[in-house]
């Protein structure tokens, strides 16, 4: 195994001494638009509703016109865009107040999460076959498009705090500070480079994870306001299946 592939694991091993995270947490579905399914281990996924409990080992899928909000054990929100599939690997809480270790495998699609105000020593790892990113302490979106069973392209945007990306093709991890983006994977334009993200993308991301009881309304191929073109990343990559609209209680919508 390449040293670079061990970096995320080594980082966690250094930050998380043996026995530090003994308490297992349970997540809960707190908002749902459309249809979603979940199952544990090898179990056949079944339809879920608001209030469904999600333990370690759960795989969650959203439909082509669905959006889902998951509240994690520490109260942080994980929003799934349409056509998204994730697997919850770890939901561990430390005996030390506020410290946690979460790991979610993003198998396809997109997620949005506010992991700000994380206690020092916390880890929130999003893992894909293209690479992984520790989003603890940040507001970030992560999109993943698989190109094969073992490869794909990962796109990360950070609007607050700083995320750390682990690229299997690079020895050193890459920091993605607030207002920045990066892409890694096969065929990703400018792979590994950290560039500025478009202001409207950052604003939409902040609004999506702003908190409160937001109604999640998913729309594949969502258009930017006043535009007839599918939503795209600042680098021009079209994300027709990863667009998501969140409607706040006052009826104002934002999409990303």
Image (cartoon, helix red, strand yellow):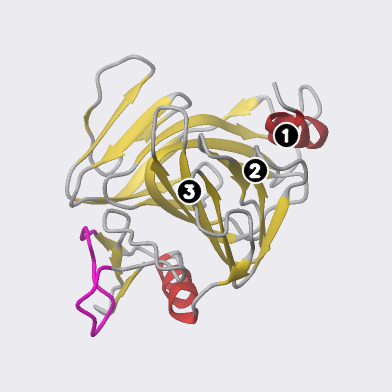
Tag on residue 105? none
Q: Nearer the viewer, mark 3 or mark 1?
A: 3
- The span from disc 2 to disc 3 (Cα, nearest Å) is 14 Å
Residue contact between numbered discs 2 and 1, judged by CB atoms under 8 Å: yes
**Sequence order check, earlier mark of 2 and 3:** 2
As measured in the structure, the alpha-carbon distance from the residue carrying label 2 to the one carrying label 1 is 7 Å
Identified at 67% across, 54% down, the residue is 118
Which residue is under mark 1?
4
**Dot 1: few (<14), some (14–19), or many (≥20) neighbours within 10 Å?**
some
Name the secondary structure under disc 1. Answer: helix
| Boundaries of the magenta span | 218-230
Q: Are marks 3 and 1 in contact (CB under 8 Å)?
A: no
Q: Position of residue 152 (x, y in %)?
A: 45, 40
Q: Position of residue 138 (x, y in %)?
A: 62, 60
Left or right: residue 222 versus residue 114 is left
The residue singled out by tag 3 in the image is 187
> Would you place residue 41 above or below residue 87 in this image?
above
């Amino acid at each position: 195994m390449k040293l670079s592939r061990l970096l995320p694991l080594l980082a966690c091993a250094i930050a998380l001494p043996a026995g530090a995270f003994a308490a297992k947490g349970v997540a809960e579905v707190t908002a749902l638009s459309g249809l979603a399914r979940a199952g544990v281990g090898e179990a056949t996924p079944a339809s879920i509703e608001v209030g469904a409990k999600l333990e370690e080992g759960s795989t969650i899928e959203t439909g082509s016109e669905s959006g889902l909000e998951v509240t994690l054990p520490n109260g942080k929100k994980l929003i799934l865009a349409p056509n998204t599939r994730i697997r919850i690997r770890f939901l561990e809480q430390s005996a030390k107040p506020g410290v946690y270790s979460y790991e979610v495998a993003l198998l396809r699609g997109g997620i949005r999460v506010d992991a700000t105000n994380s206690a020092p020593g916390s880890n929130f790892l999003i893992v894909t076959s293209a690479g992984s990113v520790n989003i603890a302490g940040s507001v970030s979106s992560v999109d993943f498009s698989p190109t094969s069973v073992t490869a794909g392209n990962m796109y990360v945007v950070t609007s607050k705090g700083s995320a750390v990306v682990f690229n299997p093709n690079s020895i050193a991890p890459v920091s993605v500070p607030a207002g920045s983006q990066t892409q890694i994977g096969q065929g990703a334009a400018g792979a590994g480079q950290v560039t500025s993200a478009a202001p409207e993308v950052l604003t939409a991301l902040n609004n999506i994870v702003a908190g409160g009881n937001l109604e999640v309304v998913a729309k594949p191929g969502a258009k930017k306001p006043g535009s007839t073109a599918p939503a795209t990343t600042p680098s021009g990559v079209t994300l027709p299946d990863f667009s998501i609209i969140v409607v706040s209680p006052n009826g104002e919508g934002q999409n990303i």
